[in-house]
Amino acid sequence: MYKVDLNADLGESYGNYTIGDDSAIIPLISSANVACGFHAGDPLVMMDTLLKIKESGSTGLGAHPSYPDRQGFGRRYMDMSKDEVRAFLLYQLAAIDGLAKTVGLTLNHVKPHGALYNQTFKDIELAETIAQTVKEFNPNLKLVGLANNHLVKAGEAIGLNIVHEVFADRAYESDGTLVDRRKEGAMITDTKHAVERVIRMVKEGKVTSIDGKDISIQADSICVHGDGEKALIFVREIIKGLKEDNIMINTF
């Protein structure tokens, strides 16, 4: 039987502003990536999200650190030194880990957010800095990165447990990277198409790029963006499709 993890980026509300439907999504997924306050979230939102994860009883907890860019939702690229990247990552990991311990949860993985994640597609040194910082903080944490790309390779090279991630709601370039959100066709909005792509990625290890080429891909975990307009619908339809194809959803 095939097995795959289903994750979502959550805890992205802030103050009086609500983003996503975390209460409905958390019980359905197997892993949650929780914003650590730099692109979204605040201490109260983080704590509330952690309590929802604990209540679910089966959802793995992950840190979702980002560039310090709340106004841009962490999706703007920033030029930072290795020391700066290391420091702001450690700050965010310590915050989510500390709050998690107070409610009896253990951090399972780290998945960078937005531009910090996407920049590793081209920047090998950044990928290595992130991997080294995660290992420094806790060598038992799993590192989640784009399938077959620099971040997972950097983590594997230093002995971290790595997770190859694929995306249900994003289009791919022919080199296996994600299509820039600013380009037409970058986001997958048709749920049926998204489910078909996910099943093929899991069972065949293939996905069709935006220019029609078949590329190889490793699907350890499927991501659905929690802030997406159709996030809850996507999650429900993906779960339905996976079950129909006898694919087990399992926390990595």
Image: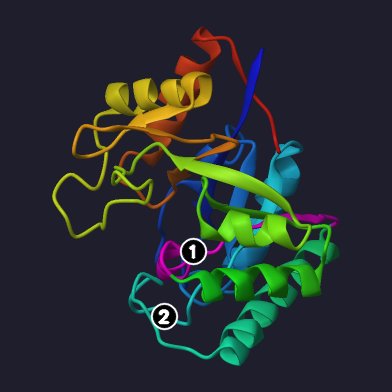
Q: Where is residue 13 in the image (x, y as percent from the top left)?
A: 46, 63
- Name the residue beneath numbered marker 2: 69
Query: 205 left or right of 158?
Result: left
Q: Residue at x 45, y 46 (%)?
A: 21
Q: Position of residue 104 (x, y in %)?
A: 86, 56
Specify the amino acid type for callout 2. Answer: Asp
Query: What is the quadrant of the C terminus in the image?
Result: top right
**Going from the N terminus, do you reach mark 2 or mark 1 first?**
2
Query: 170 left or right of 59?
Result: left
Report the label total.
2
Residue 113 image label = 1
Residue in front for this viewpoint, 124 or 242: 124
Q: Point out the stretch of residues depicted in magenta.
A: 104-122
Task: Give the secondary structure at mark 1.
Answer: loop
Q: Please say whether residue 43 is visible from this viewpoint.
A: no
Q: Where is residue 71 in the image (x, y as percent from the top left)?
A: 34, 79
Residue in front for this viewpoint, 23 or 225: 225
Query: What is the quadrant of the N terminus in the image?
Result: top right
- Vertical relation: 205 (above or below) 70: above
Task: Give the secondary structure at mark 2.
Answer: loop
Magenta stretch contains residue 7: no
Q: Which residue is drawn at 39% across and 66% down?
A: 17
Q: Which residue is drawn at 13% across and 49% down?
A: 184
Residue 168 image label = none
